[in-house]
Image: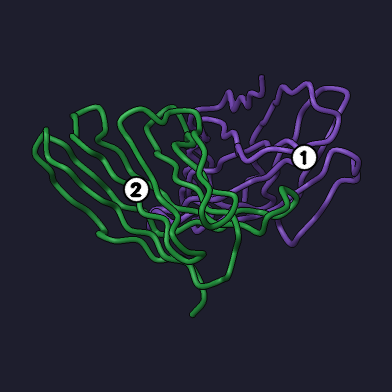
């Protein structure tokens, strides 16, 4: 069975602080895909990143970076120099190579205060 | 603008009533999905369709049905709504291969009283 755990229910930071959102996953598949989505207060789901299980290179996109560690089954997301606009619910998700099910974590609410 | 549209935006429904949530995409994606979002549970898959004419059950299919008569439309029907179906419903679509991300509609907020 596949499972995604986002242990942090809610995080509050002050603007310009760095913040890391944790994601731990479980799967028996050798090939799988990991995703992060952002859900701002407006409610839509915004795709942030996709990473396949064979690519453990960390990725940086502006203030966002992702740390994929297969050895610990983790795919953590760091926001550097957080901004108020980063306030949102962030979801980590997992999908097997052959399957239609995108398994989501419960989400982490990030509040960035000015 | 290409994307996914959902209707209605929100709805309050009496228990026992029938309701169809509409979803249309214009990206010519083969696969479409319905999720429900509940606090503390993230999003859970209700039903999916790999291609027009086929559908499959997700994690929480009971009380819901879907149809996929064409590529663009994927309606979700609640035959007899119950209060536990109060939720935010998201439609999504993707290219057939699982390597591609799913694109989500704006959601429908449904309240069953």
Q: Residue at x 27, y 48 (%)?
A: B109
Nearer the observer, B77 or B54: B54
Please say whether residue A46 is visible from this viewpoint. no
Left or right? Give the position of B37 relative to B98.
left
Q: x%, y% of residue B111?
A: 19, 40
User: Which shade of the palette goes to chain A?
Assistant: purple
Task: Check disc 1 and report the residue beneath it.
Answer: A97
Tell me which chain the residue with mark 2 is part of: B
Which quarter of the figure has residue A32? top right
Residue B92's place in the image compared with A24, above or below, is below
Q: Secondary structure at mark 1?
A: loop
Please say whether residue A27 is visible from this viewpoint. yes
Q: x%, y% of residue A81?
A: 66, 53
Give the total number of marks visible in the rendering. 2
User: Which shade of the palette goes to chain B?
Assistant: green
Q: x%, y% of residue B78?
A: 26, 40
Label 1: how many Cα within 10 Å (few below 14, some 14–19, many 20+): some
Task: Check disc 2 and report the residue beneath it.
Answer: B76
Residue A2's place in the image compared with A83, above or below, is above
Q: Secondary structure at mark 2?
A: strand
Residue B12's place in the image compared with A22, above or below, is below
Left or right? Give the position of A93 relative to B110.
right
Tell me which chain the residue with mark 1 is part of: A
Q: x%, y% of residue A31?
A: 84, 35
Nearer the observer, A6 or B88: B88
Q: Residue at x 40, y 50 (%)?
A: B67
Q: Residue at x 46, y 48 (%)?
A: A113
Query: For the N terminus of chain A, which image quadrant?
Result: top right
Which quarter of the figure has residue A72? top right
């Amino acid at each position: 069975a596949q499972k995604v755990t986002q242990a942090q229910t809610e995080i509050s930071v002050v603007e310009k602080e760095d913040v890391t959102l944790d994601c731990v996953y479980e799967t028996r598949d050798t090939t799988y895909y990991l995703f992060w989505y952002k859900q701002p207060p407006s409610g839509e789901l915004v795709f942030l990143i996709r990473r396949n299980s064979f690519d453990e290179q960390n990725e940086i996109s502006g203030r966002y970076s992702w740390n994929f560690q297969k050895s610990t089954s983790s795919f953590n997301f760091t926001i550097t120099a957080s901004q108020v606009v980063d306030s949102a619910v962030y979801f980590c998700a997992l999908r097997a190579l052959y399957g239609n099910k995108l398994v989501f974590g419960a989400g982490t609410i990030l509040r960035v205060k000015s | 603008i290409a994307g996914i549209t959902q209707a209605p935006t929100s709805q309050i429904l009496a228990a026992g009533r029938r309701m169809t949530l509409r979803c249309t995409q214009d990206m010519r994606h083969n696969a479409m999905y319905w999720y429900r979002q509940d606090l503390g549970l993230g999003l859970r898959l209700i039903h999916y369709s790999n291609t027009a004419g086929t559908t499959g059950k997700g994690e929480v299919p009971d009380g819901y049905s879907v149809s996929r008569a064409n590529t663009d439309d994927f309606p979700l029907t609640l035959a007899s709504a119950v209060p536990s179906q109060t939720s935010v419903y998201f439609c999504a679509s993707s290219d057939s291969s699982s390597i591609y991300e799913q694109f989500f509609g704006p959601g429908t907020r449904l309240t069953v009283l």
